[in-house]
Image (cartoon, rainbow, N blue to C red):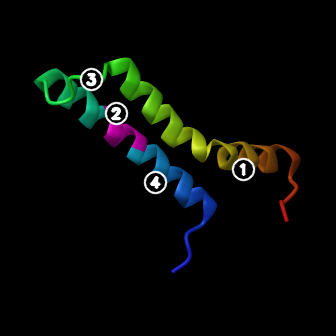
Amino acid sequence: MEIKAKDASLYAKILAVIVLLTGVVLIGVGILKNLTATDMIWIAFAIAGIFGTVDINLFLEKITGRKGV
């Protein structure tokens, strides 16, 4: 099975949301005492940002009509 870049980007976004929500809940409950909600937001941005270039490339392909190599 082959994973396409578009699918990997979607999975990364979903994972980022899950990490963010889980982290904020664990901070609220008191399990993650050394992290803040801001830390969790930055972690989620980092996860989503890794695949951000995929979204940019797909967007540019739609605008220009050119396909990448």
Which comes sooner in the sequence, label 2 or label 4? Answer: 4
Residue type marked 2? Leu
Residue type marked 1? Leu
Mark 2 vs mark 1: give the one in front.
2
Magenta span: 16-20
Q: Which secondary structure is most common in the magenta stretch?
A: helix
Question: Residues under labels 1 and 3: Cα distance?
Answer: 38 Å
| Residue named by callout 3 | 34
Whether 19 is among the magenta residues is yes
For the C terminus, give its image quadrant.
bottom right
| Residue named by callout 4 | 11
Which comes sooner in the sequence, label 1 or label 3? Answer: 3
Mark 2 vs mark 4: give the one in front.
2
Mark 3 vs mark 4: give the one in front.
3
Q: Position of residue 11 (x, y in %)?
A: 46, 54
Give left or right: position of 10 versus 22: right
* Circle 4 Cα neighbour tier, 10 Å, few/some/many (<14 / 14–19 / ≥20): some
Give left or right: position of 40 versus 65: left
Q: Secondary structure at mark 3?
A: loop
Whether 51 is among the magenta residues is no
Which comes sooner in the sequence, label 3 or label 4? Answer: 4
Question: Residues under labels 2 and 1: Cα distance?
Answer: 25 Å
Mark 1 vs mark 4: give the one in front.
4
Q: Position of residue 15 (x, y in %)?
A: 39, 47
Q: Does residue 38 lie above or below 64 as drawn?
A: above
Which comes sooner in the sequence, label 3 or label 2? Answer: 2
What residue is shown at x 41% (from left), y 46% (from top)? Answer: 14
